[in-house]
Image: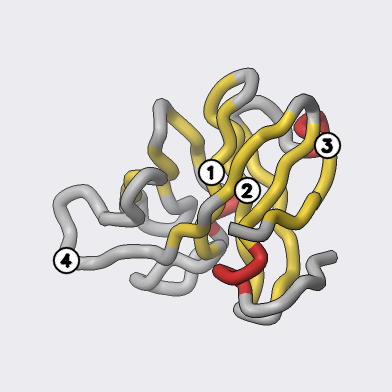
Amino acid sequence: MSWIDIGSLDDVPLRGARVIKTPVGCIALFRTAEAEVFAASNTCPHKAGPLAEGIVHGQKITCPLHNWVFDLNTGEAIGEDARITTYPVRVEGDRVQIDAASIGSRRVA
């Protein structure tokens, strides 16, 4: 994998989210623990709710519009026939990195 640095771990609030813009659309970074970050589509497939505004709990995100819950490891909705796209992300030291191939370009903002 080819990794792109997308910011400091401190840029993503603990049990919160931050949105980045990419060629595949907006991706939400969810920080579930001190050094644990997940990356997934920011859009709920149900009613296009902004997932970054949802509630982070454990390794899940709850949509702020209709309470659909998604597993951040797999993107699968709990109790629904739906999923969100997830992206490979890692923490190296205090930096968050995302896989370049998964977002189709070497540019993120």
- Mark 4 Cα shell of 10 Å, populated few (<14), some (14-19), many (≥20): few
In the displayed structure, 92 sits above or below 21; it is above
Position in image of residue 51 (x %, y %): 52, 55
* Image marks 1 and 2: residues in contact by CB distance under 8 Å: yes
Do the numbered discs 3 and 2 sit on residues whose CB atoms are within 8 Å?
no
Q: Is residue 3 left or right of residue 51?
A: right
Element type at marker 3?
A: strand
Which quadrant of the view contains residue 46? bottom left
Please give the name of the residue rendered at 44% of the width and 29% of the height, measured from the top-left corner: 57
Identity of the residue drawn at 80% across and 50% down: 5
> What's under tag 3, amino acid-wise?
Ser
Q: Which residue is mark 3?
A: 8
Q: Which residue is mark 1?
A: 38
Amino acid residing under circle 2: Leu
Q: Calculate the distance from the C-alpha at mark 2 to the C-alpha at mark 4.
A: 23 Å
Q: Which residue is mark 4?
A: 81
Alpha-carbon distance for marks 1 and 4? 21 Å
**Which of pointers 4 and 3 lies earlier in the amino acid sequence?**
3
- As helix, strand or loop, the secondary structure at mark 2 comes to strand
- Tag 1: amino acid: Phe
Is the residue under label 4 in contact with that under label 2 (CB below 8 Å)? no
Q: Quadrant of the N terminus?
A: bottom right
